[in-house]
Image: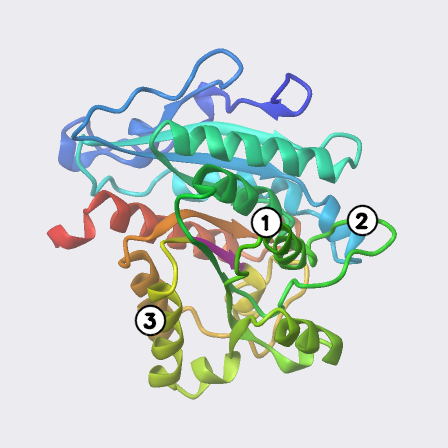
Amino acid sequence: MITKDNYQPTAPNWWTGRIDGVDSDLLRWHQVVQVTNLLQATLPALQPDQKGIALLGFACDEGVRRNKGRTGAVEGPAALRKAMANFPVHFNAQTILVDAGDILCVDGELENAQQVLSQVVKTILTAGYLPLLLGGGHEITYGHASGIRSFYAGKQRVGFINFDAHFDIRILSEEGPSSGTGFWQLAQDCRCTGEPFQYLALGIQKNGNTRQLFNIAGEEEATYVSADAFHLQDKDTLFAAIQHFVSQVDKVYLTTCLDVFAAPFAPGVSATAYNGILPGGLFLQSYRSILQSGKVAGTDIAELNPSLDIDHRTAKLAAALIFEVVMEYSGAESSF
């Protein structure tokens, strides 16, 4: 459960930015976001005609440290909030945008932080909100996806989609889970409950994954599309993989590791990729196609490391992806 030690509410005055006016067509996100302290209150109750989106930070990079990466992603949620604050409001008053604060990793106890994250995600879903999580290292995956699986247990088939240069399917080391083990952990959980492990990785780099990782992905019957499909504009392969995968599940956990993108666009990550994919047309089409499926039960952005960012490029890219999620989920995209 959350406590004052493992949870930090967002200060009400954190959301600030430009003010053009207070008319509905002049508003920006910082003017409409509702800050909720989960230690003191529940998420605002949704009316039948309302949709809710809950922003939740995972201020943790202990998994990155264990994975021998460059730490600093613990500051990711704060940087993301700043990058989002001035976005224009294109959704109507029937969409409630809530900032539910940050889950913290206390004294390097990653396993506890992931358990708390899972519980809070389940609480968000129970309240009828879409969890939209702000990382933090990619250890966010296990806690977030576990919360979704717990909520839909026995009712819906949950599949996992990961935009990433890496499989993140490493076997646990003596140090325990890390930012690279999330999908291996989920595979083991699915095996224990007798459920199929349905995992699609998009943007995989051969020079970023050992043969063992490819072998494990094969053994777990994971599906992947390499970064070459994005580089070579192989739309048929990419969209066939996405459409087939989405048709096989009822709900989707969607995660985006920012190191999937080329270093000039995403310098602020633990492991930059000189040959990462471009955050342009083909990527946006694929990303939007998943959102438009109507099956996304929760989504997150991982590996934003502000200490390594240049001109806030990575934060702005991450925020733009969040904007896409909010636009699609609220129905605002269809009004343009």
Please state the horizontal and vertical placement of residue 228, each as a whole percent of the image. Answer: 50, 85
Name the disc covering residue 243, or none: 3
User: Is residue 34 on the magenta stretch?
Assistant: no
Question: Which residue is tagged 1?
Answer: 193
- From the viewer's perspective, is 144 left or right of 45? right
Camera-side mark, 1 or 3: 1
Quarter of the figure with the C terminus: bottom left
Tag 1 and tag 2, C-beta contact below 8 Å: no
Residue drawn at point x = 40 percent, y = 68 percent: 245
Q: Amino acid at mark 1?
A: Thr
Measured in 3D between alpha carbons, the distance from the residue under mark 1 to the one under mark 2, in whole angstroms, is 21 Å
Q: Classify 53 as above or below 40.
A: below
Q: Secondary structure at mark 3?
A: helix
Name the disc covering residue 176, or none: 2
Measured in 3D between alpha carbons, the distance from the residue under mark 3 to the one under mark 2, in whole angstroms, is 34 Å
The image quarter in which residue 291 lies: bottom left
Q: Which residues are magenta?
A: 253-257
Q: Residue furthest top?
A: 40
